[in-house]
Amino acid sequence: DVLERVADRIDVSSLRVWFEGTCAVGLDDDAVTVAVPNTFAEDYIRTRFKDVLDEELRSVLSSTAEIRLVVGKVEQT
């Protein structure tokens, strides 16, 4: 849902390149944990897109919510 909401603020090619292979793997009161395929993707998403993702997540979940990025596959909770 968050990616759909930020689609007008992140260009289509960036969405395809950087978010393909990502998966939400956890949800708690103040965070969504997202698994990314490698450390390069983690660093790129964190430095370029995390602020806009956090902002949108806060409008959906809570005022303190944030995206947490983890590398690799993680069991869903």
Image (cartoon, rainbow, N blue to C red):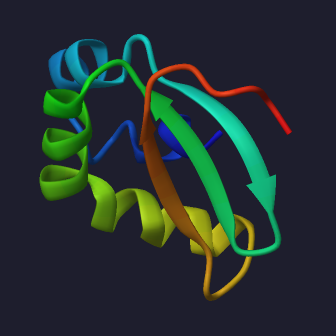
Image: 50 above or below 42: below
In the image, taking residue 24 as reference, residue 34 lies left or right, namely left
Instruction: Please state if 1 lies on the left or on the right of 39 as rendered.
Output: right
Q: Is residue 39 left or right of residue 72?
A: left
- Percent coordinates x, y for residue 47 in the rendering: 13, 56
List x then y, in percent, for residue 71. Answer: 39, 32
**Residue drawn 58% across the image and 63% down it:** 57
Identify which residue, 54 or 30, lies in the foreground: 30
Q: Disc count in the image?
A: 0
In the picture shown, does residue 52 fall above or below 1?
Answer: below
- Residue 77, quarter of picture: top right
Q: Residue at x 71, y 65 (%)?
A: 60
Relative vertical location of residue 59 with respect to residue 45 in this rendering, above or below: below
Which image quadrant: the N terminus?
top right
The residue lying furthest to the bottom in this view is 63
For the residue pair 23 and 1, the one nearer the viewer reads as 23
Displayed quadrant of residue 12 = top left
